[in-house]
Amino acid sequence: MVDYTMKDITTCGGGGRKHGGAAPPCAACKLLRRRCAKDCVFAPYFPADEPQKFASVHKVFGASNVNKMLQELAEDQRGDAVSSMVYEANARVRDPVYGCVGAISSLQQQIDLLQTQLALAQAEVVQMRMRMRQYSNNSSTISTSPDHHYYNSRRSIFSMEANMEDTFWSS
Ligand SMILES: [Zn+2]
């Protein structure tokens, strides 16, 4: 099983490139063997010391598509866009059939399983409470008036069921 964690989403170094002088080309321009212009759209997000980031994004999306996607975004959104593209690309490289859909559907399955387990556990709690109430009703005959007792237990069981339904349908 592939380990799908969010570890691939790294914060992009963003923005801190020193211009002027003989700045080393960014990872993108280095891979594409082109001159890294002062206003290179890749440079803030693909620093030279992390060549793998651009390599997988280029392999999956293609450099010109990445370029286009970044150009269409506001600058303050580009860092997040690059992070998610790198994540998607790495997932696709690891799992050529499902890519990050593999991670999504495996997490969806876990949610379904856990929701079923939760519903079962909640049903068990309801049953146990009912049994406890029956037991205490049988053993304490003198303490409170039977009407009052009955009303209380009915009410809490109903509210428990309502809660359960909430959890069921809210997702
Ligand atoms: Zn560049």
Image (cartoon, rainbow, N blue to C red):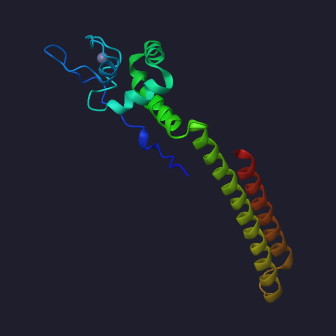
Residue at the (55%, 40%) spot, across then down: 95
In the drawing, does residue 115 fall left or right of residue 15? right
In the drawing, does residue 60 fall left or right of residue 102? left
Q: Quadrant of ligand 1?
A: top left
Residue at the (35%, 15%) spot, across then down: 41
Would residue 79 be seen by someone viewing this image from the given angle?
Answer: yes
Residue at the (80%, 61%) spot, across then down: 158
The picture places residue 48, in percent across and down from the top left corner, at 27, 27
Near-viewer residue (125 or 42): 42
Residue 146: quarter of image: bottom right
The picture places residue 111, in percent across and down from the top left corner, at 65, 51
The picture places residue 130, in percent across and down from the top left corner, at 79, 74
Would residue 81 be seen by someone viewing this image from the given angle?
Answer: no
Is 31 rendered above or below residue 97? above
Residue at the (69%, 45%) spot, across then down: 171
The picture places residue 52, in percent across and down from the top left corner, at 36, 33
**What is the number of callouts on the image?**
0
